[in-house]
Amino acid sequence: MKFLLKLAVRNLFRHGRRTLITAIAIAAGLSIYIFMDSMLLGMELESQRNLVWYETSAARVHEQGYWAERTTHPLDVVIETPEPLVAALSQRGIAGAPRTVFSGELVVFQDPYPEDGSARITAYAIDPMRDDDVFRLKETIVAGRYVKPGEAGAVIGSWLAEDLGADVGYPLTIVTRTRQGYYQTVDLEIVGIARTPNPVINRGGIFLPLDTADRYLQMEGAVTEINMQLSGPVVTGGERYMRERTQEIETALASVVPNIVVFSWRDMAADYLALAEVKKSASGIILFLVFIIAAVGVSNTMLMSVYERTQELAMLRAMGMSSREIRITFAAEATGIGILGALFGAALGAVLAAFLVYIGIDMGWMMRDMDIGYRIAQQMRGTWHPAAFFQGGLLAIVVAPLIALVPVRRALKMEVSDALRG
């Protein structure tokens, strides 16, 4: 066995060019696999963080019955007394931010806008003193300022501002219905423009002070939701972790205000997570095809290697080497090529992944006008995934000798005399 391994090592260096070409084929496939795995996993994690930080929060309290009608943003299924719930959350070390979400028609008029226009929108009434304890909207203001309590002001998403031709100081009018169902006109002035990492907020976010909305909508202190910022692995903790956390919070709050329900961000983003799972399966197929392409390259190279050495194989058989020993020699040689390819591929993959992690790719040109589901507005970054290095490298090392054994088996079926004649 020791002699066979030495022979395999010598063959690696004796056929250096062929070894290098085959190792490069393996390295290319592995590095692309690592790059794409880092990119896809990074997009998924970044999207989930941006969901929690700008859309859903980690968890949310609703009145029972609201969730079934959430798409219409009803104002008659509300939390009547939010302050006891916020206080109860604070006692447990959880920041709470009440909001009222309502739908309406946004209306703008020519002068100062380029032209008259209207569109259906969803508006978010926020508590300026507590909302930034849960969400990160305040730190994304790129023009103007954040809203202040009591003012008839609004912060809007940057892409919405571009579409409208709006700027700080421009008026906005929202036509909606009050809690009692009466039509109401909400006149606001744009005081700030936010550019967030979340395309949904950039594309249509309109935020106004909670007390201003309370007055216009006749809410009398009621809100539609209370959002929470939780400590711990909110994004990476998994479905079971979040379900246990929300059940614990719901049990504690039920004694304060009855008829409330607590939803985790996973419950609220179920549609997105289902879509992401489908995309992950499709992406897995792409990664598999990348490796298949690399395997075909390895197969071709190994096939040429074996057929070019048909006479050498015949001579070894004539000298008494058994078919089993020849298979072991070629398998060891191919394993060595696989190891070299895995090392080169892991090194190149690490460089490509590092580029994604520390620099990233600007995706703003695509996300601006195309909604592909991911909550990434501009810079797409990857993430380190050690399992991809291990799994991809191991697969490369295993695949190489398996591929090599196919042409070896065919060569061994030839008669020694025929093989020596070539």
Image (cartoon, rainbow, N blue to C red):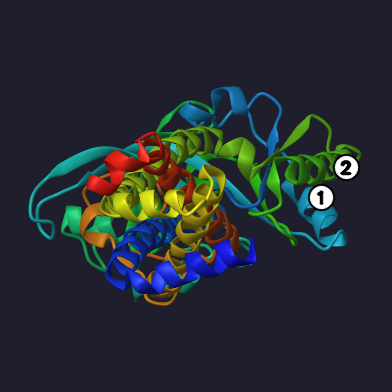
Q: Quadrant of residue 24?
A: bottom left
Find residue 376 and report its horizontal and vertical position in percent.
39, 56
Above or below for 153 versus 142: above
Q: Amino acid at mark 2?
A: Val
Q: Earlier in the sequence, mark 2 or mark 1?
A: 1
- Left or right: 344 with respect to 134? left
Say which residue appears at 48% left-offset and 50% top-offset. Answer: 401
Say which residue appears at 24% left-offset and 58% top-offset. Answer: 161
Dot 1 alpha-carbon crowd within 10 angstroms: few under 14, some 14 to 19, many 20 or more: few
CA distance for labels 2 and 1 = 7 Å
Of the 4 image quadrants, the one containing the N terminus is: bottom right
Residue to which mark 1 is pinned: 84
Above or below for 205 versus 256: below
- Left or right: 149 with respect to 283? right
Q: Amino acid at mark 1?
A: Pro
Residue 256: assigned label:
2
> Which of 414/279 is in front?
414
Say which residue appears at 42% left-offset and 51% top-offset. Answer: 375
Find residue 124 and report its horizontal and vertical position in percent.
48, 49
